[in-house]
Image (spheres, rainbow, N blue to C red):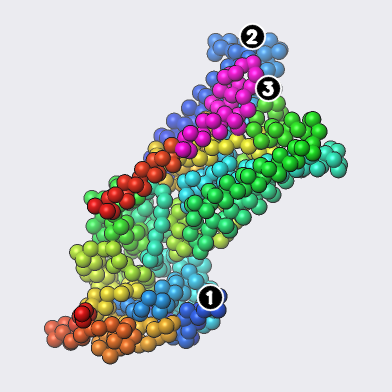
Amino acid sequence: MSLFPPRSSKPILLLVLLLILVMSISLMIGGFSFYPTDVISRLTEQQWFILWEIRLPRVLLAAVIGAGLAISGVALQALFRNPLAEPGLIGVSSSAAFGAVFVIVLGGALWQEVTVWQISVAAFLLASFSTAMLYVIATRQGHTDVALMLLAGVAFNAIFGALTQLLITFSDDTQLRSALFWMMGSLANLSWFSVGMVSVFVLLATLGLWRLVKSMNAFLLGEHVSLQMGYDPKWFKWQVMGLSALIVGVSVSMVGVIGFVGLVVPHMIRLWVGADHRLVLPLSALGGAILLVLADLLARQLLYPSELPIGLLMALLGGPFFLMLLMTKRQLRISSVQRKRL
Amino acid sequence: MTLLSTIQVTNLEVRIANTTLLSHISCEFKAGNIYTILGQNGAGKSTLLKCLSHEMSPSKGEVHWDNRSLEHFSYAELACQRAVLSQSNELAFSFTVEALVQLGEEVVQRPCTEASLVVEAVLTVCDLIPLRHRDYLTLSGGEQKRAQLARVLAQIWPNSPAKEGGEDFCGKWLLLDEWTAGLDIKHQQSLARYFKQWASQGLGIIMVLHDVSFAAQLADRCLMLKSGTVFADGDVNQVLTQSILTEALEMQVQVECDSKTGRPNVSPRLLL
């Protein structure tokens, strides 16, 4: 197990405190607000119920899913050696959503009772499949073609989006509602069971990826370089694909597609502490948790009493951010071309 | 003194999709020498280097390091013994020069105090001290090359060289693919001096070069490849002759023996 690099304790501590603060605020604000001065013993039974059965699992789930999505973004970015790789952007999430909807519609027709496990496994399988496919398409001889990766992502999003909509035309009313939910993403109406399940899988996958932080660093230098530095790139690739697909699959099967967390958070973290994965991975996990808890709070409060699907909100916030990222990349490229000409 | 490390190549053949890149390659590399692999574009120089570093597995034949087949080494084991600078290096993430070098240093388990010394030494050798906090992506091509070279050197840099005399590079190998490309002459020359010094301390250096006159000044032995086979193999004096260079590289060249150094003085001539 690798150790944290020096000077890492301060940023981690800072984000942990921030996360606790954001989570407490999110717990207190809502259709029914609490104040820090409210002593817990003075809460009524109904207040307890709201806090314990509705708000706490939701806040925890937002934190875990946010952390997971940010981590899977970091892992995919290392795999593709490019900071623009993100499960939502390159179609991994939408393929997982298709898997989930497919099982709901088909399973609903064939064997009536569809379990959470079946949905999760389908989402995981589709997520693994599309990650592997994308890697095969975009990477030749250890080099990733970024344009090809993003374009293949566009194609994947289109294909799986269309397939999901096709399924929706065949589905009845309740199925329709849940299919829409998977496409837009929502943290509403989830139980302690889902919190537990997501937490276990995200934690396992995170530990698995944490073992690989040094290889991730080396992999950024190129597949052949990581081999020369003593890491086995083949085994590394399988692990990263599997573990990130596990996170995306489980998250999508619980809350649907929530994009851009894996893009925005690692990017900000890298601007702050550099590209070393031993820092980027844990800090992105914390950052992702903070971002999604905040976004969930916004989604609940912005149009109160109705609720904005959090996937839509993240797309509305993340889309412009992505464009901004592309613009600065373009500027960098133009300025470097100019410098070469001079 | 420990036995000098050797790399033995026997009857190597590399075929990819019905194209034969290398065939019937047999040669030997002994640590403590500087080897250059010469040849035209597509002669198989980089392929041979990739086989030596176990990045590529040959279709036939074998590479032995100290009488042990390369196939029996783990990647981690090899990483502590040899470092490789590839022809192309891609990096789309902003690492500082120092952080990049640390990546190479971390390949080997070292005590903490040792680690920072190694990074410092390597940065000094590659003249990167003024650039250490710069973002790699903002460096010029030649500076990036030096940063990558520093990262590679850190991987095999000996622990506390001062304490144990000059033998610390023993058993280590440095494989360089066109390391001079993009470097200015000053840095080519200062690094070449270091290479000489380390070779005398037991480091084995194998480099692919295009600059024959530079090779003539630097190398101890040359391996000349032509269309995937060994054209000539031997001391610089034996290989860098007018006839071999004209035939193998198809270049217009004048070779004289430098009476002071005893090395061939190779001057490519542009006949217009």
Asked whether the residues under the numbered discs 1 and 2 touch, taking CB atoms below 8 Å apart as contact, a structural biologist would say no
Q: Is residue A300 left or right of residue B46?
A: right
- Tag 1 residue: B16
Question: Residue A162, relative to residue A196: is it above or below?
Answer: below
Q: Is residue B3 visible?
A: no
Q: Nearer the viewer, residue B104 or A301?
A: A301
Both labels 3 and 1 in a single chain: no
Q: Chain of mark 3?
A: A
Segment colored magenta: A294-323
Could you say which disc has been placed on residue B94 in the image?
none
How crowded pointer 2 is (Cα within 10 Å; few <14, some 14-19, many 20+) is rated as few
Q: Of the residues shown, which amino acid type is indicated by label 3? A: Ile
Residue drawn at 56 percent across, 23 percent down: A298
Is residue A223 visible in the rendered image? The answer is: yes
Q: Which residue is mark 3?
A: A54
Q: Which mark is residue A42?
A: 2
- Residue B259 sits inside the magenta stretch: no
Numbered disc in front, either 3 or 1: 1
Distance, label 2 to label 3, CA atoms, is 19 Å
In which quadrant of the rendered view does residue B255 lie? bottom left
Q: Earlier in the sequence, mark 2 or mark 3?
A: 2
- Mark 2 chain: A
Q: Main secondary structure of the magenta part?
A: helix
The kind of residue on which mark 1 rests is Ile
**Residue depicted at x 63% and y 44%:** A158
Q: Quick one: A25 or A118, which is closer to the camera?
A: A118
Tell me, yes or no, whether the highlighted magenta stretch contains residue A301: yes
Q: How many circles with numbers are drawn on the protein?
A: 3
Q: Which residue occupies the foreground of this view, A335 or B30? A: A335
Residue at image point 47% right, 66% down? B77
